[in-house]
Amino acid sequence: MPAVVAIGRKPDVSACGYCHRAEGSGGPENARIAGLPFAYIVRQLADFKSGARSTAVPNRAPHTLMVSGAKAISDADALEAASYFSSLKPRANIRVVESETVPKTYVSGWILAKSHSTETEAIGQRIIEVPDNLEDFENRDGHATFTAYVPPLSIKRGEVLVTGQDVGKAPACANCHGKDLRGLDAIPSIAGRSPTYIFRQLHEIKTGVRAGTAIQPMTENVAKLDHEDMIAIAAYLGTLRP
């Protein structure tokens, strides 16, 4: 494990493994980066540094930390980190559950956590993704698992959209992300990723805050997707093996 992943570089580069975990498994608040293509990771660091990859939520801490780190990291450390994380095998850690009701939650750091009560509430048009064991997550355990609650019928609708069966909405994701949706060359895997993360990226690409030349094809693909479509896509992708 490179030093920049394990301990970072003082004063401005936090340890990559603190937020993304040493195994690159990430969490709902950021991204799983284990197994992403080397070239893709390098490009994302460049996009964070240039401002091409921004956020729809001003001052959101995970994004702020990524921007400051990307601006301060040396080229050598960036390449070492990309080489390390791209060599790791992603692990399945998401369970997607369709439900009309969900456990009540509260904000814990940068994520939602289940309330200690047994109360529930209507899900509405939301994704409620929570760690199965909050202590595991808070201790940066790379084996922490998550449950993502999604509205009823989301998974089937997502499959229709992802496989390109609704041509009026978007083409098949496999056209770019590979037939198994596990990436192709410098294009990332989208199978088995956090539904919260997937929804956030679709929303930010559509609203233009995530930009850059490599994102242009996605900008066209998400143009006709609405809020419910993006939830459905995120739900279906979360059910796949990474």
Image (spheres, rainbow, N blue to C red):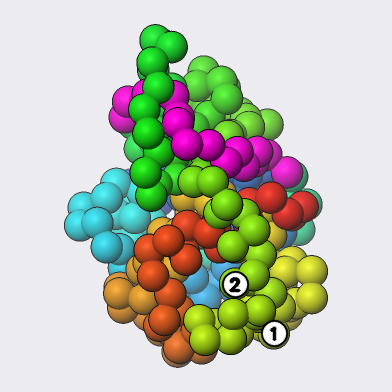
**SS for callout 2:** helix
Question: In the image, which is nearer the foreground, mark 1 or mark 2?
Answer: 2
Percent coordinates x, y for residue 93 in the rendering: 67, 39
Residue at position x 31%, y 29% in the image: 107
Amino acid under disc 1: Asn
Point out residue 2 in the picture as x, y percentages from the top left corner: 63, 49
The residue tagged 2 is: 161
Q: Picture quarter containing residue 36?
A: bottom right
As drawn, 41 above or below 20: below
Front-most of 68 and 60? 60
Label located before the other in sequence (1 or 2) = 2
**Farthest residue, direction top:** 117
Q: Is residue 3 magenta?
A: no
Secondary structure found at label 1 = helix
How far is disc 1 from disc 2 in space, using C-alphas? 13 Å
- Of 226 and 67, nearer the camera is 226
Which residue is pictured at 38% across the width and 63% down the height? 227
Whether residue 193 is visible here, answered yes or no, is no
How many labels were placed on the picture? 2
Question: In the drawing, what numbered circle is on residue 175?
Answer: 1
Residue 51 location in percent, x, y?
30, 74
Please give the name of the residue rendered at 31% of the width and 78% of the height, measured from the top-left corner: 208
Which region of the structure is painted magenta? 92-107
Q: Is residue 136 left or right of residue 200?
A: right
Three-letter code for the amino acid on which mark 2 is drawn: Leu
Q: Residue at x 69, y 85 (%)?
A: 175
